[in-house]
C-alpha cells in the first residue's frame, strides 16, 4: 500500500443530507478507510482517483424511513505533493482535490420531484499536512499525522425562492455555497504488515450568505484494521459521524427550534492489490444506521501511483 496517498483523497465530499446541514457533508464519511492516514509516503508527487457510488434512503431524527431516495456517482481525482521537507521533525505534504458529482434525488414520495444533476463540487486544498514517525520517541511502528483542508466556495450551486422573500438551496444543487475549514488528526500503527488507523476530522462551516443558512459543525471518525499478505491487503473499516452544533437560519435554530443534527455509522470490508507502483483498492461501507441524513452505502474503486 502506498502509505498516505489517501491524505489527498480523504479530504473529500458527498453524503447527501436530509434534515441537517444545508447541502452535502463536506467530508465524505469513510473516505480515508484503508489508508494509513497518520503517515506520509516518501518525497515525490502522487496521483489518486477514487470512483464512488453512493445510494440510499433518507432517515428522520428517530432513524425512521422518509420516502426520499438519493444516489450519487463521485469522481475524486487528487494530487499529493511530498517535498523533501521536515517541519518540527515531521514530514510535510500538500494536496489538492477536485471532485465531480452526478446526483439523483427522488422526492416524489413527499410531494416533491425527481431530479438528476451534475457539476463540480467545492475545490479542496490542503496546504499543510504533517506526519511524525514516533519511533524517535520509543514507539516503533506508530505514526501521528495532522492536517488542514479548506473547501473553497467555487462549485456548482443552485438557489430558488423560498416564498418568503429569501432563497433556499435547490434540489439539483451539487456543491456547498459556503467555505469549510477542516482540521484533522490521525494515528497509524504500521508494522508486520498491519495497518491499524484512527482518523478524526472536524468540519467547521461558514454561513451561506445567499440563504443565510449556517450548517452545523460535524465530527467524523474513520477506522481501519487491515493486514498485508505479499501484494494483497485485506481488512475492515468504518466511520462514525456526528453533527455537534445546530443548524441556524439568520441566527435562529432550525427544525422548530430543535436544530436536528445528523448522525450515521458505516461498516464494511476492504481489499487492495499492488501492480508494481500502482495500488488498486476496493471497499464497501454499508450504512448501519442514520438519523437526519440519508442512510447511504458507499462503494469505492480507486487507484493511486507516484509520478
Image (tube, rainbow, N blue to C red):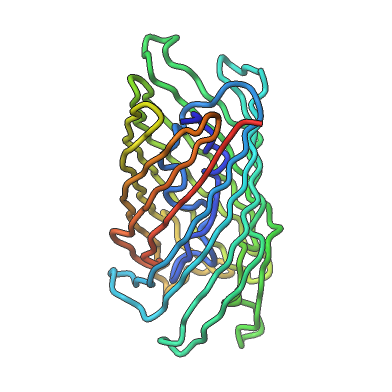
Taking 14 as reference, is 136 above or below it? above
Location of residue 45 in the rendering, given as x and y in whole percent from the top left corner: 66, 30
Q: Percent from the top left, x then y, of residue 199?
A: 42, 37
Q: Is residue 277 left or right of residue 266?
A: right
Q: Is residue 64 above or below residue 282?
A: below
Q: Position of residue 206 (x, y in %)?
A: 61, 56
Q: Residue sitting at 53 percent across and 42 percent down?
A: 303
Furthest residue toward right: 154
Picture coordinates of residue 227 (x, y %)?
32, 31
41 is higher (above) or lower (below) than 267: above
User: Looking at the image, which residue sits at the far front?
Assistant: 275
User: Which image quadrant for residue 210?
Assistant: bottom right
Say whether residue 290 is left or right of residue 19: left
Residue sitting nearer the eye, 244 or 103:
103
Rendering quarter of residue 261:
bottom left
Q: Quadrant of the C terminus?
A: top right
| Nearer to me, 214 or 196 | 196
Q: How many marks?
A: 0
Q: Residue at x 58, y 41 (%)?
A: 48
Residue located 62% across and 59% down the image: 100
Task: Determine whether 98 is above or below 201 in the image.
Answer: below
Residue at x 57% of width, y 54% of height: 205
**Is residue 115 left or right of 109 when viewed as pictured?**
right
Amino acid at each position: 500500500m502506498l502509505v498516505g496517498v489517501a491524505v489527498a483523497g480523504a479530504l473529500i465530499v458527498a453524503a447527501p443530507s436530509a434534515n441537517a446541514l444545508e447541502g452535502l457533508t463536506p467530508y465524505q464519511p469513510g473516505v480515508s478507510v484503508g489508508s494509513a492516514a497518520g503517515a506520509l509516503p516518501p518525497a515525490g508527487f502522487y496521483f489518486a482517483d477514487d470512483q464512488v457510488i453512493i445510494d440510499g434512503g433518507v432517515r428522520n431524527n428517530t432513524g425512521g424511513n422518509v420516502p426520499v431516495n438519493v444516489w450519487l456517482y463521485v469522481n475524486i481525482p487528487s494530487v499529493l505533493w511530498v517535498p523533501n521537507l521536515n517541519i518540527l521533525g515531521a514530514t510535510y505534504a500538500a494536496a489538492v482535490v477536485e471532485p465531480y458529482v452526478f446526483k439523483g434525488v427522488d422526492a416524489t414520495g413527499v410531494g416533491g420531484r425527481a431530479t438528476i444533476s451534475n457539476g463540480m463540487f467545492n475545490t479542496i486544498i490542503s496546504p499543510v499536512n504533517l506526519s511524525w514517525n514516533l519511533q524517535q520517541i520509543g514507539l516503533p511502528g506508530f505514526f501521528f499525522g495532522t492536517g488542514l483542508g479548506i473547501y473553497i466556495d467555487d462549485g456548482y450551486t443552485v438557489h430558488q425562492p423560498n416564498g418568503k422573500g429569501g432563497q433556499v438551496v435547490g434540489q439539483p444543487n451539487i456543491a456547498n455555497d459556503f467555505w469549510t475549514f477542516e482540521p484533522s488528526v490521525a494515528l497509524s500503527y504500521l508494522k508486520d504488515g498491519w495497518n491499524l488507523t484512527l482518523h478524526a476530522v472536524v468540519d467547521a462551516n461558514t454561513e451561506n450568505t445567499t440563504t443565510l443558512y449556517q450548517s452545523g459543525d460535524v465530527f467524523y471518525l474513520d477506522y481501519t484494521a487491515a493486514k498485508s499478505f505479499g501484494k494483497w491487503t485485506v481488512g475492515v473499516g468504518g466511520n462514525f459521524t456526528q453533527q455537534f452544533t445546530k443548524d441556524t437560519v439568520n441566527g435562529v435554530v432550525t427544525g422548530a427550534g430543535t436544530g436536528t443534527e445528523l448522525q450515521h455509522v458505516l461498516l464494511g470490508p476492504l481489499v487492495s492489490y499492488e501492480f508494481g507502483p500502482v495500488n488498486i483498492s476496493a471497499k464497501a461501507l454499508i450504512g448501519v444506521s442514520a438519523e437526519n441524513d440519508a442512510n447511504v452505502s458507499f462503494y469505492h474503486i480507486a487507484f493511486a501511483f507516484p509520478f
